[in-house]
Image (tube, grey):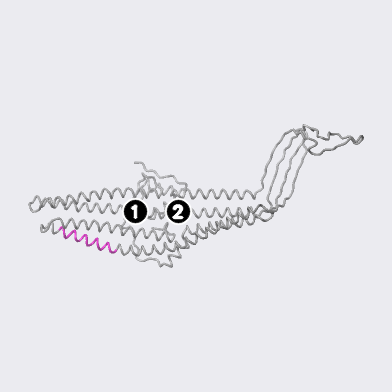
Amino acid sequence: MKTTVRISTIGTTIALAASVAAAQTPLSLGDAARLAARQNGALDVARARVDQAASRARQRRGALIPNLAADVQQAERTINSATFGFTFANPVTGQPLLRPDGELIGPVPTVDLRYRVQAPLLDLGRYAGWRAAQAATTAASADVEAQADLAAAAAAVAYVRAVRADAQFSARQADSALAADLVRIARDQLQAGVGIALDVTRAESQLAAVRAQIIAARNDRSRTLLELKRVTGLAPDAAVLLADSLAGLPVASSLPSPDAALGAAMEQRADLRALEAQERAQLQAARAIRWERTPQLGLVVDHGVIGRNWERLLPTYTWGVQLSFALFDGFRRTARLEEQVAVARETEARLKDLRTQSTLEVRTALLDLASSEEQVTAVAERLRLAEQEVAQAQDRFEAGVAGNADVIAALLSLNQARTLRNNALAEYQTARVGLARAMGAVRRLP
């Protein structure tokens, strides 16, 4: 099967994705998070927004640069003398040379070649608008980092689901091996005349039930791997080798203090920094609107040659310095300023809510992590007792002092204990990812 990886615009992403897919490099939890932070589909959208914002900033900067235009015109003109009020008279007779009700003059051919330069000398409003556009570009770049953290967290959670599904599949295989041994023992005892057919039927029924569970577990493992490939940006047919097992993922012996975790969250969370940058950009845009009220000073130069034909062209020019004032615009600028200030207030409210939400997420993640750690310890003890129960029931059955009903009941208990162990470990790792996400450190997971 051919292995392919979606092409990314980032060279390092291409190298990393190709090494994972083609060479089947083991993919760890941290690798999955960092890979998604580089090439998740949502990042392409965010990067396109950065390019759009940068283009708008260049447009604003262009308004501060002198503009140069040139044109060539060859034309013929006629005019109505009455339109311009020409009243020329004969200096001798005093009679008018042109009819009082208007007379057509021309056509007059003209050739006109010229260039025009317009340059702003002082325009604080346009300068502030350019700076506001630059701030918007910075905010868009910060949003890319926020999207990268979201993608990394989603990939880490998908990785935990994948290793849990793999652990479930392995657990069901172990259950199947025990059930197969039980069938073998029951058949041997029946053949030796010390067992009954009911024991064989019970054992075969249990083996069939476990095989059905294996089919469901295998399907779940395949589906979680497909989801992991999607969030990490890998092709659906890419071969992924999970470097970590569910039981092999680290379980921390100590948790960070709430104050330390909250401090890290306020400093490191990319979504907080993105909203802060967005608020600064909106306030800068409001200042730019205020600066539009200041006078604008500009230079205009119009230079060229003009004549009735190409053989005789005479130079002509116009130049001047223009000072403009915005006196009244129907309150449009005031309305734009009010709108921009309201947008900034909305972002400020969202930022305040996000800080509160971040605090809640950190504290919730710490609670979930502590609780799930206790659950892991509790289910580990239950698993040990379930394994001991199976071993004791098997010994009694093999010795012929009991039927296999006790063994099957013990197998069911062991099946449930293994599932609970996998669920507890998956919940712990999900809580660990949640804490890293809340603290803004999900891309630093090992």
Magenta stretch: includes residue 390: yes
Residue 421's spot in the image, x, y percent?
28, 59
> Helix, strand, or loop for circle 1?
helix
Upstream in sequence: badge 1 or badge 2: 2
- On screen, 22 above or below 377? above
Residue 44's spot in the image, x, y percent?
47, 48
Kindly report the distance in space between the C-alpha atoms of the residues bearing marks 1 and 2.
20 Å
- The residue that mark 1 highlights is 161
- The residue furthest left is 193
- The residue that mark 2 highlights is 148
The residue shown at (35%, 47%) is: 226
Identified by mark 2, the residue type is Ala
Q: In which quarter of the image is residue 107?
A: top right
The residue shown at (25%, 57%) is: 416
Magenta stretch: includes residue 205: no
Question: Quadrant where the N terminus lies?
Answer: top left
Majority SS type along the magenta span: helix
- Which region of the structure is painted magenta? 377-394
Residue nearer the viewer, 44 or 282: 282
